[in-house]
Amino acid sequence: MKELRTLYWKASKLYVLDQRVLPHRVRYVVAVDYRGVARAIKDMTVRGAPAIGVAAAYGLALAAVRTKGLNPQRALERLQRAADVLRSTRPTAVNLFWAIDRVLSRAERAVTNGENLADAVLEEAHRMAEEDVEVNRTIGRNGAQLVRDGARVMTYCNAGALATVGYGTALGVIRAAVEQGKRVFVYVPETRPKLQGARLTSFELKTAGIEHKVISDNTAPFLMSRGEVDLVVVGADRILATSGHVINKIGTLSLALAANYFGVPFYVAAPVSTIDFVRSLPQVKIEERDEREVLEVSGKRIAPRGVRAINYAFDVTPPELVRGIITERGVIRPDELMALRERAGV
Amino acid sequence: MKELRTLYWKASKLYVLDQRVLPHRVRYVVAVDYRGVARAIKDMTVRGAPAIGVAAAYGLALAAVRTKGLNPQRALERLQRAADVLRSTRPTAVNLFWAIDRVLSRAERAVTNGENLADAVLEEAHRMAEEDVEVNRTIGRNGAQLVRDGARVMTYCNAGALATVGYGTALGVIRAAVEQGKRVFVYVPETRPKLQGARLTSFELKTAGIEHKVISDNTAPFLMSRGEVDLVVVGADRILATSGHVINKIGTLSLALAANYFGVPFYVAAPVSTIDFVRSLPQVKIEERDEREVLEVSGKRIAPRGVRAINYAFDVTPPELVRGIITERGVIRPDELMALRERAGV
C-alpha cells in the first residue's frame, strides 16, 4: 500500500482513489468542490467510516476556499450548507458527522479569532488525516496482543488502509501483529454485495505479503464450527455507547453469531470517533442502497428480469456477541463505553 | 415451471436442463451414455440432491442398454463400473448413492428372474422419477401446515422443482401453502458462490407468481433480528440419522444459527431418501469445489490475480438448531430419525 493512498490533497484539489474499480484498475477521481466530494462518498468511490470522515473534512476545506471575500457570518453559513450536503450522503457511519462537526467548530473558532477561514479549515482536515493514521497504529498495537503467533484471523469487508487514511483498523491489528513477527493467516469473506473483501482486503493483504484466502461470506460459520478460526476482528461504522450495539457492514452479525456459538473471540476495531455517545438504536438510520448492487455483479444481472432485491448496507450486532472493542484508548467491553467517555473526556 | 423439466427421457437419451445458464438461457444438454450423465452431475448442469439421484438412475439405464448381448454376470459388472463412475461425481449428497443402490439391486433381481436388464433398469429409473414428484407433493402438504397465511418465509439455495424432478422440497412446502390459498412472501438468499437462489429459486417463484425478493446471503440474520422472518425452510443433501446433523448447501448453518438466536423456526424439507441411516459425521466427505467458483462471477474475476479461495460446497448444521425435518412420512425431530427407520422399514 506504499504507493496507493486512499485520498490526498494537492494543489487545492482532493484526489480520491476510486475503490469501485479496484483491484483491476488504479484510478483517482479528482474533487474540485464539496459537491464532488459528496458524490464520491455517496457512490462509494471512497468508503470506510474513517475515510469518509476525512474526505468530508476536505470537502469542507474545498467549500471554505470559495468563501473568500464573504463576511465571516456569510462564510460560515456557506460552510454549513456544504456540511448539510456532505452529511446527507450516507446516514449510518458516525465518523462522517463527527468529522463535519469538528471542522465546523474549528471554523467558528477561526472566525471568532479573526483567522483565515480557508487556511484554518484545511489545516484541520490535514490534522485529522494525520491523526487517523496515528490512531490506527495505536489500535493496531492494542489489538495485536490478542493475536497469537500462528493465529488464523477472520476479518470482514475492508477495515484496512483503504477504509481509512492509512494502516487500517481491523487490518491494522493484523498488520501490527505481523510487524511484531507473528505469523498470521487471514480469512477474507468476499463481502457481498460490493465485494470489498474479495476486491480490497485481498488487494491490501497481497500487497503487504500477508497470507490469506478469500471465502464466500456464508462459509465463515462452517470454518468456525470446524475450529479453523482463532479470532474474528472487524471494523465498525457506528458503535452505540448507550447500549453497546455495533453497526457495521451487512454480514457482520452473521460472523458474530457464529463466533459466539462456536466460542471464537469476536472483536471490533475502531477509533473512538466511531463511538456514538448520544443516540440509541432506534435513532440510527440503517442505509438501504440501490437493489441493483445485489442484482448485478460486475454489471451483469444475476437474477431474472423483474425480480427485486432488498439491500441493507449495514446490520446491528448486539453487545452480548462482542468480546471487546479495540480502540486507541485500549480494548474495552461494550458495557464500558460510557465510562470511556468520562475517562477520556470525549 | 410447467414448460421446463429438470430432466426427461426421450428416444433412449437423457435430456438435462442446463442449470448453469439459467435464468438467462434455457438449454438442454443431451446425455447419450452414463459418462455424459456423470459429467452433467459433476459440472452441475443438473444439481439438487433428489435430481442428481434420478439423473444417476437414468445414467445406469443408459449403461444397461449397452450391455445387450453380454451374459448376465458381465452385464452386471458393466453396470457396477458405470455405478462407480456415477458415484464418484459428487461425494456429499446421499440420494445419489441411494438411487444407484436401488437401481443396482433392481438389476440383480432382473438377472435372477431372467428379465430384460435394460428394460428393468429403465423402468426403475422412470418409477423413481415419478415417485420423486409424488414424494415432494406429500412433503409440501406436510410442511404447508407450518406456514400461516401471510407468512414471510426464508428458503435457501434452490430446493425447488429444479433440484428435483418436479415440485421441489422446501419450495414444495411454499407451493403447497400457496395452493391452499395462503399468502406467502419468500426471501431468496442469492446463495454464493453459484447463485442458485438468485438464478434458480427466483426464476421458479417468478414463474409460479409467488411474491419474493432476493437478498445477499449475509442479510438473512439482520432480517431475522428485526422480526421480519416467520419461518425458514431449506432442503438437505444428507441428514444423519445417527446424530441428527443436516448437511446442506454452504451457508445453511448461518441461517440456522441466526434463526436459533432470534427465535425463528428453522425446518428442513427432504425426502426419506436423503436420510443416511448408517454413517456418522466423520464418515461424510464435505465436497470442496474449484476455487474459481468463488473468485469469478459470471466469468469475471473479482479478486486480484494470484489470490486463492476456499470453496466448501456444503456445511453441517447441528441437530439442536433444527426444529423439525419435513418428510413424506411427516414432520419429525432430528432425534426421531432412527425411530423413523424402524417405523417405516426403510
Image (spheres, coloured by chain):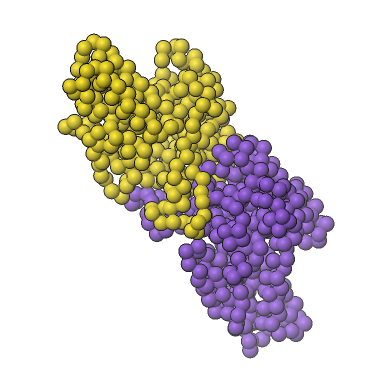
Chain colours: A yellow, B purple
The residue depicted at 60 percent of the width and 53 percent of the height is: B211
Return the x and y of residue B6 as percentages of the image width and height: 59, 68
User: Which quarter of the figure has residue A186?
Assistant: top left
In the image, A169 versus A66, the foreground residue is: A66
* Left or right of B215 in this view: A5: left
Rendered-image quadrant of the C terminus of chain B:
bottom right
User: Which quarter of the figure has residue A236?
Assistant: top left
Residue A184 sits above or below residue A106 on the image: below
The residue depicted at 24 percent of the width and 17 percent of the height is: A72
The residue depicted at 28 percent of the width and 24 percent of the height is: A78
Count numbered badges in the picture. 0
In the image, B31 versus A82, the foreground residue is: A82
Tell me if I can see residue A333 in this picture.
no
Return the x and y of residue A148 as percentages of the image width and height: 45, 31
Return the x and y of residue A218 as percentages of the image width and height: 52, 46
In the image, A184 versus A38, the foreground residue is: A38
Quick one: which residue is furthest to the bottom in this view? B69
Rendered-image quadrant of the N terminus of chain B:
bottom right
Return the x and y of residue B176 as percentages of the image width and height: 71, 57
In the image, A304 versus A182, the foreground residue is: A304
Tell me if I can see residue B153 in this picture.
yes
* Left or right of B267 in this view: A242: left
Residue B103 sits above or below residue B177 on the image: below
The residue depicted at 25 percent of the width and 36 percent of the height is: A31
* Left or right of B323 in this view: A269: left
* Left or right of A162 in this view: B88: right
Quick one: which residue is furthest to the right in this view? B343
